[in-house]
Amino acid sequence: MEADEPKHCAWCGRRLPGSGRIGRPRRYCAQPCRQRAYERRAALQRGGLPEDAVVLSTSELADLQDRLFQLRCAAEDVVTAAQDGAENEELRKLAAELVESAKGLERLR
């Protein structure tokens, strides 16, 4: 990762402020995120799950599936509009909606 590239919290994904500190780089934006990450690591160890396991509740999984469906629909809208000869302005609008749907998928928590 480049030195000037923004870094993000390892738990919530929020952008980390530039620290200018000497020493180990920050991994979390705040103590609650650091605590949740610790709790997750401890729960994984107790449960015998691999370190890189992702555990989602039923509601989190349903939410993720809904957001994936929205993304697919937005992409299909762009394709349909392009095939139907839509104007550039309409395609720009649909593409912007597609980007917003994709941004919603970036957050898992």
Image: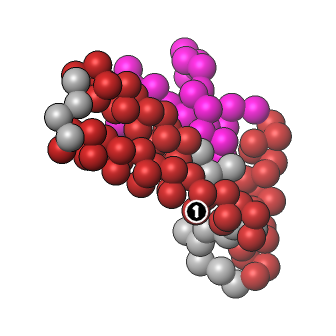
Number of marks in the rendered image? 1
Q: Is residue 99 visible?
A: no
Q: Assess whether residue 20 is covered by the magenta stretch.
A: yes
Q: Is residue 83 above or below residue 87?
A: below
The stretch in magenta equals 1-30
Q: Which residue is mark 1?
A: 65
Quarter occupied by residue 92: top left
Q: Is residue 52 above or below residue 70?
A: below
Q: Circle 1 — which element?
A: helix
Point 46% across, 26% down: residue:
6
Point 67% across, 64% down: residue:
62
Front-most of residues 55 and 71:
71
Quadrant for the N terminus, please: top left
Is 87 positioned to the left or the right of 103 in the image? left
Point 51% across, 57% down: residue:
69
Q: Assess whether residue 73 is covered by the magenta stretch.
A: no
